[in-house]
Amino acid sequence: MELSVPVDDGVKLNVRYRPGEDGRPFLLLHGLGSNARMWDEVADRLAAAGHPAYAADMRGHGGSDTPEHGYDNATAVADIVTLCRELGLKEPLIAGHSWGGNLAVRALAQNPGLCAGLGLVDGGWVDFASIPGFAGYAEHAQLRRPDATGTTRDGMRLMLRGLHPTWSDAAIEASLADMVEGPDGLLVQRLPLQRFLPVFHSMCEDPPARWYPGVTVPVLFLNALPPQESWWSTNVRRWVAKAEAAIPHAESRWYLDADHNLHADDPERLAGDLLDLARTVEDPKSLDEPLPERS
């Protein structure tokens, strides 16, 4: 089921909803330039376990409105808070991927009691500005993310299948939803560069570490490590260690040789880890104990 939720100045966000039973609900947040459909396979499993699942398209993404304004972390956080209110979510569990994890940390820190626990999926620690020599990050983003793919939908589907051989057909189609066909029939990014870059700037200028002191709920970091060591994996380890030291009830689980999009790469394991977080939240006595390990 898809819901249309008003957040600000007439802007409406699209939310993909799966009813559960009486479990604590999950609010699922995607990464920058992505969309809520990437959570579908995880959301199916959460709902089957009794947890209502709400996966939101942030403004400019997926099926949500694309206003001219609001492409920054502060506005995105305000949208998340409004979503919780409009959907009637009382202390849900929030899972955020990449940029969505950063947003979840800030949203909770600025709004104590917003949620009961955080599942941060290869995010919640991303701090590009802390990388020595990482100057000109806007230019870096522009080079890494061209505005147009220059290919057809069928061509992009084949490309994605080659890049992600372990993904299901549903995950491939979800990733394709990041793009739309232009007048020439070739694909362009749904979130154009002129809107992507302000969000990326805001992400770089708003490191999540500044918000860690306000995070007192259980936090589960679910971190991907690529098969080869790189500047990225070195920084991921550093960022995660900093987060674990600053947040009282934080644990990490590592996905080795894994794709950044863990919700597409291994939805069964990721859903299982998030359900472990839910069980920990419901048992206050476990707050000072490590979360159970999952292979």
Image (cartoon, rainbow, N blue to C red):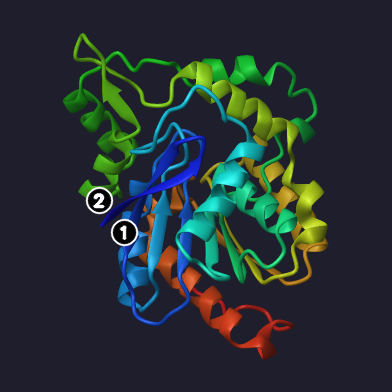
Q: Nearer the viewer, mark 1 or mark 2?
A: 1
Q: Which residue is mark 1?
A: 41
Q: Which residue is mark 2?
A: 168
Tag of residue 193: none
The furthest residue to the bottom: 285
As measured in the structure, the alpha-carbon distance from the residue carrying label 1 to the one carrying label 2 is 9 Å
Expressed as whole percent of the image width and height from the top left, the position of residue 262 reads 45, 53
SS type, badge 2: loop
Crowd band around label 2 with a 10 angstrom C-alpha radius: few (<14), some (14–19), many (20+): some
- The amino acid sitting under disc 2 is Ser
Viewed as shown, does residue 80 lie left or right of 128?
A: left
The answer to whether residue 261 is seen in the rendering is yes
The furthest residue to the front: 9
Viewed as shown, does residue 47 lie left or right of 60?
A: left
Residue at (60% x, 79% y) in the render: 281
Q: Quadrant of residue 131?
A: top right
